[in-house]
Image (tube, rainbow, N blue to C red):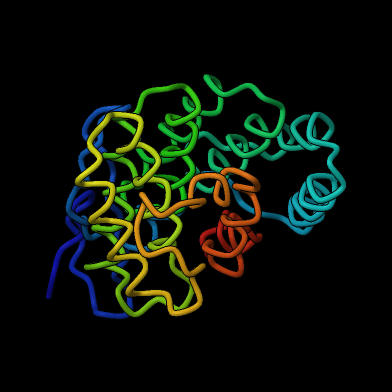
Amino acid sequence: MPNCEKCGRKLKQSQIKEVAPGKLKGDSEITEKKILCSDCWQYRTVFTPLARRVFEKIVMLEQQGEHEEALKKLDYIFDSTNPGLWYKKAELLAHLGELADALECYEEALFLDTHLVKAWYKKGWILFHLEKFEDAVKAFDNVLELERTEFKFAEDKWTHAAMFGKIFCLEQLKRLDEAITVFQELHKMLADLPHFKNLEFKGFKEFILSDIDRMLRFLEPTKAGAVGFSNVAGI
C-alpha cells in the first residue's frame, strides 16, 4: 500500500489523489506526480452552494464580455491554493488586456499543478503576444508532452492548437526549418486542414493571418478554455 507523501498515511487505491506541484514559480519544468490522501489533497476552500452560484455567475458574466465585473465576483470565492481559480483569473485578465498580470496567474496555477495542460497552452499565447518566443515554444512543447504521455486518451486535446502556436513562434525566431516540420506534422494529423502543403505555399500566411481566431476555434478542443465548477472545486 502506498503512503501519502505529505502525512505518511497508508492509502488504499480508492484513497489515492495525485498532484504535480512545481519546484519554482515561472519554471517550465513538468514535475512528477506526488501521491496524497484525500485530506491532504483537498483545496482549502469549501465550495458551498453559495460559492457554486457565484462561480456560475462569473462564467455567465465572462460569456457576456463583462470581464471586470466577473473579476470582482471571483474575489469573493478566490482561493490561492486552487489552480483552477488562478486559471480563471488569468483568463479574465487576458480578456482585459492585462497580459503581464495574466501571465503571473497562469504561473501561479502551474506552480500548483504542472500538469494543467490548458494553462501551459494559454501561457504560450500570452508569451507569444509579449514577444517571449523561446519561452512560448517551451510552453507549447509542454502541452504536446503532457498530451502525448499523461493525457494520451483524452477526448478534447490542445495538441493541434499548440502545434499551431509553436509554428508561429518558430517563425518569429527564424527557425523556419523547424516551423515547416511542425506544420507538415500538423497537416498529416488533420485531414480537413486547409489545402496548403507547407509554410511557403503561396497565400498561406495571408490565409492564416486573416483570422487567427477562426483558426484557433477550428484547432482548439470543443470545450476550449472552459473551466466548470467541477474543475475548480476538485470534483
Q: Quadrant of the C terminus?
A: bottom right
Q: Residue at x 33, y 37 (%)?
A: 171
| 24 on left or right of 95 | left
Q: Which residue is painted at 42% across and 22% down in the image?
A: 131
Give the residue at the far front of this rendering. 202
In this rendered view, identify the residue nearer to me: 114 or 40: 114
Quadrant of the image for the N terminus?
bottom left
In the foreground, 32 or 206: 206
> How many discs appear?
0
Residue 70, percent from left and from top: 79, 37
In the image, 89 versus 21, the foreground residue is 89
Residue 116: image location, x then y, percent: 40, 52
207 displayed left or right of 199: right
- Write down the quadrant of residue 139 in the picture: top left
On screen, residue 95 versus residue 86, left or right, reads right
Q: Residue at x 46, y 52 (%)?
A: 202
At 48% from the left and 28% from the top, the residue drawn is: 103
Question: Residue farthest to the left?
Answer: 1
Q: Position of residue 45 (x, y in %)?
A: 58, 46
Q: Is residue 27 above or below residue 1?
A: above
Horizontally, residue 7 falls left or right of residue 17, namely left
- Give the quadrant of residue 136: top left
Which quadrant holds residue 175? top left
